[in-house]
Image (cartoon, rainbow, N blue to C red):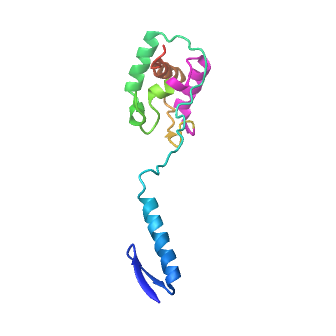
Amino acid sequence: MTVCYISGICVTVKTPRFFALGLFLASFCLVACNNPEVKNHRKGIDYIRAIPGKNDTIPVAISQKGEVLIAYSDCYTCHKEDKKSMGPAFKDIAKRYPVQRVYIDMLAQKIISGGSGIWGHAIMSAHPKVSNEDAKIMVNYILSLKEEL
């Protein structure tokens, strides 16, 4: 019977053959764990998933009013203009959705009623005190951040 210490663990081996096998497996594990060549290559997920479509124009006055409404709301608690925070960046929202009435209406409803699942696990809290018209103006500002406009 042989007693040895492998990585701080006491191992009792009854025959030299098992000792050699155990030593080989332990050294293999150490080499594999310290191999700098082995990297975790996860395939990137398209975070934005842009919806194709033609963009309508957004009047500058509407966009400016939307910027003011957002500044006086609690939107910046969870969103930033150009980087992901608790919620998606406004520019990422603008990249995903074309400037079309159907998406403006849908996003305005999302502001009012809240929701989750569209941008991962983050939960959008409801804003029932925001009128439908103000929510649409806010969405127009967000979509005006689209770089192609």
Q: Of 80 and 35, which appears nearest the observer?
A: 35
- Estimate the x, y position of residue 73 in percent, counting from the top left: 40, 29
* 115 displayed left or right of 88: right
In this view, the residue in front, 124 or 88, is 88
Residue at 41%, 37% in the rendered image = 85
In the image, residue 78 lies at what x, y percent?
A: 42, 36
- Give the quarter of the image for residue 56: top right
Q: Is residue 148 above or below residue 6?
A: above
Q: Which residues are magenta?
A: 95-117
Does any portion of residue 131 appear in the rendered image?
no
**Left/right of residue 1 with respect to residue 107 in the rendered view:** left
Whether the magenta-drawn stretch holds residue 105 is answered as yes
Asked if residue 130 lies in the magenta stretch, the reply is: no
Q: Residue at x 52, y 10 (%)?
A: 57
Q: Residue at x 46, y 18 (%)?
A: 147
Which of the pair 45/77 is nearer the observer? Answer: 45
As displayed, is residue 1 above or below residue 46? below
